[in-house]
Amino acid sequence: MTGVNEQQELFKLIGRQLKKRVECYVIGGSAMLFYGFKTVTKDIDLVFTSEEERRRFTAVLKEMGFAHRRYSDYTAENAAVLMERKEARFDLFLAEIITTVLSPGMISRIKEKHEFSNLVVNVVSPEDIIVLKCATDRAGDRKDAADIIGSMEISWDTILEEARWQAANGKKAFVIFLFDFVEDLRYDYKAIIPRSFTKNLMKEYKEQLIKLLGYKKYKEMDGK
């Protein structure tokens, strides 16, 4: 586990050791630490837009005693690099995060940017933390999303627009992932989600299923 102070210290150390400027995007529990939504995280999740910058970052981690745990198999081309040292672990993504793409919208919504010498850390918005968590099957991600929803006013229009972008430019089933995720939040975690959003999401969900399955198969499934 890594706490708020430990994460800050790690970023400071890495930034001082980097020979050239590296920019990354912090997501997941790591981003939640910046907002104060939680106090510890299992791993520090970072997204890079350049393989060269990810390599420079990884090289510094090796100098600090971090070792490759394994390469994930999320995708053949954009596999995440996982590195750890004792209780600290980094998951380093390249543009694609499991079934999600770091989008222009996510980048435009960055409001928090922190500079640690040669390391620039951009913190994704709370809405985008939720979007990025929706494609996993982990109960912890659902609880994290519910905690964010319970802590602040969420722009649900932003989440819906981002889901549409992801479906058009990333995984075609993304709206379906989001729909299932939101249903879990509503029923299992009692999250308060606006009716207007769930209504619009249901419409998108049906349209996406028809595109993926075809109208006939969709009607057969819908009739069961």
Image (cartoon, rainbow, N blue to C red):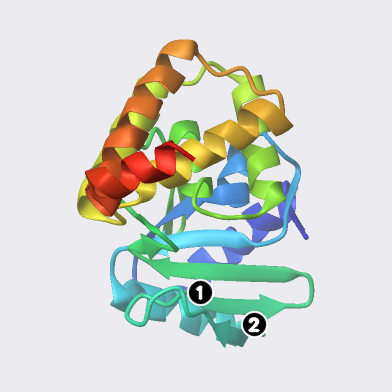
Residue drawn at (66%, 70%) of the image: 89
* Image point (60%, 25%), residue name: 149
Disc 1 or 2, which lies upstream in sequence?
A: 1
Residue type (three-letter) at the residue carrying disc 1 = Gln
Report the number of numbered marks: 2
Q: Nearer the viewer, mark 1 or mark 2?
A: 2
Q: Label 1: state its secondary structure.
A: helix
Name above or below for residue 99 compared with residue 20: above
Which residue has dot 2 on it?
A: 66
Residue 35, picture quadrant: top right
- In percent of width and height, residue 61 lies at 56, 79
Relative side of 157 to 62, left or right: left
State the residue in front, 224 or 89: 224
**Which residue is pictured at 66% across the width and 56% down the height?**
7
- Work out whether 92 lies above or below 215: below
Structural crowding at the residue carrying mark 2, measured as other residues with C-alpha within 10 Å and reported as few (<14), some (14–19) or many (≥20): some
Query: Which residue: 45% across, 21% down?
Result: 198
Depth check: give the residue in front, 140 or 216: 216
Question: Which residue in the structure is indicated by mark 1?
Answer: 17
Left or right, residue 70 beside residue 195: right
Q: Nearer the viewer, residue 41 or 130?
A: 130
Label 1–label 2 contact, CB within 8 A: no
From the top left corner, tell me how far across and down residue 4 is, in percent.
Answer: 71, 47
Quarter holding the N terminus is bottom right
The x, y position of residue 52, in whole percent, is 30, 78
Query: Residue 27 at x, y = what percent?
Result: 50, 50
Which amino acid, by three-letter code, is at mark 2?
Phe
* C-alpha gap between disc 1 and disc 2: 14 Å
